[in-house]
C-alpha cells in the first residue's frame, strides 16, 4: 500500500480495464471516483471496491458530454478536495473494419468520446482564452483552479 492516499478518477469504471484499474487503486488505499454512463455496472464496481475495504464514489456520466465531465470533477473535489490522477479510459470499440469502410456517424461517435473525455483539455479550452496557462496544483494534484 502506498503511504499517500491519492484521489483517482477512473472513467469507464463499470467494466473491463476500468473496473480492474479501480479495484487495483482501491486496494492500494486510494480514494476512487468511478465514472461510467452505465449506472448498474458502475455501482457494481463501487460495491466490489467497498467489499474489499476500499473507499470511493460512483458518478454516472457520459464523458462525451461537457456538463457531465464538469459534474464529476465537481463531485470529486467536493468529496475529496482534489484530483491526483485521471485515468481517462472510457471508450468505445468499433467492429474491426478498414478505415475507409467505417460509417461517418460511427466515426463521430468514437471520436467524440476520445476527444471529450480529457478534462484538462476541456477546461484549458474554456479558461485559457487562447493563452497558455499552467494548472495550479495542490501538493500532489488538481484542485480545480488555474494560475497563469
Ligand atoms: N480491450 C482491448 O483490447 C482494447 C484495445 C485497445 C483499446 N482499448 C481501449 O481501452 C478502453 C477500455 O477498454 P475495455 O476493453 O475495458 O472496454 P469495455 O467496453 O469493457 O469498458 C468500457 C467502459 O466504458 C464505458 N463507457 C463507454 N463510453 C462511455 C461514455 N461515453 N461515458 C462514460 N462511460 C463510457 C462503458 O459503459 C464501459 O463500462 C477503451 O477506451 C478502449 O477503446 C481496449
Image (cartoon, helix red, strand yellow):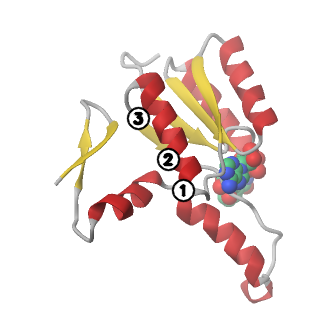
**What whole-number distance in Å separates the C-alpha atoms at marks 2 and 3?**
13 Å
**What whole-number distance in Å separates the C-alpha atoms at marks 1 and 2?**
6 Å
Residue drawn at x 39%, y 35% is 84
The disc placed on residue 83 is 3
Answer left or right for 120 relative to 22: left
Contact (Cβ within 8 Å) of mark 1 with mark 2: yes
Look at mark 1 in the image and give the residue it sits on: 66
The image shows residue 144, relative to residue 26, as above or below, that is: below
Residue drawn at x 41%, y 60% is 121
Answer left or right for 43 relative to 64: right
Answer left or right for 72 relative to 93: left
* Observer-nearest of 15 and 115: 115
Q: Is mark 3 within 8 Å of ligand 1?
A: no
Residue 48, image x, y percentages: 73, 20
Sequence-first tag of 3 and 1:
1
Residue drawn at x 40%, y 54% is 120
Would residue 82 be seen by someone viewing this image from the given angle? Answer: yes
Mark 3 residue element: loop
Sequence-first tag of 2 and 3:
2
Answer left or right for 14 relative to 147: right
- Crowd around label 3: few <14 · some 14–19 · many ≥20 (10 Å): many
Which label sits in the foreground, 3 or 1? 1
Residue 8, image x, y percentages: 49, 33
Q: Is mark 1 within 8 Å of ligand 1?
A: no
Look at mark 2 in the image and give the residue it sits on: 70
- Crowd around label 2: few <14 · some 14–19 · many ≥20 (10 Å): some
**What whole-number distance in Å separates the C-alpha atoms at marks 3 and 1?**
18 Å
The quadrant of the image that shows the C terminus is: bottom left
The disc placed on residue 74 is none
Residue ranking furthest to the front: 67
Mark 2 residue element: helix
Amino acid at each position: 500500500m502506498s503511504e499517500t492516499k491519492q484521489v483517482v478518477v477512473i472513467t469507464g469504471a463499470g467494466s473491463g480495464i476500468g473496473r480492474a484499474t479501480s479495484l487495483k487503486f482501491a486496494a492500494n488505499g486510494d480514494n476512487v471516483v468511478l465514472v461510467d454512463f452505465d449506472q448498474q455496472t458502475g455501482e457494481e464496481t463501487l460495491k466490489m471496491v467497498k467489499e474489499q475495504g476500499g473507499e470511493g464514489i460512483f458518478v454516472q456520466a457520459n464523458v462525451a458530454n461537457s456538463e457531465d465531465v464538469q459534474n464529476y470533477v465537481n463531485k470529486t473535489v467536493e468529496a475529496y478536495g482534489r484530483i491526483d490522477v485521471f485515468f481517462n479510459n472510457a471508450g468505445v470499440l468499433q467492429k474491426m473494419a478498414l478505415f475507409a469502410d467505417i460509417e461517418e456517424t460511427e466515426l463521430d461517435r468514437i471520436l467524440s468520446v476520445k476527444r471529450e473525455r480529457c478534462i484538462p483539455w476541456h477546461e484549458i479550452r474554456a479558461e485559457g482564452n487562447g493563452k497558455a496557462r499552467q494548472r495550479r496544483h495542490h501538493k500532489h494534484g488538481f484542485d480545480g483552479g488555474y494560475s497563469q
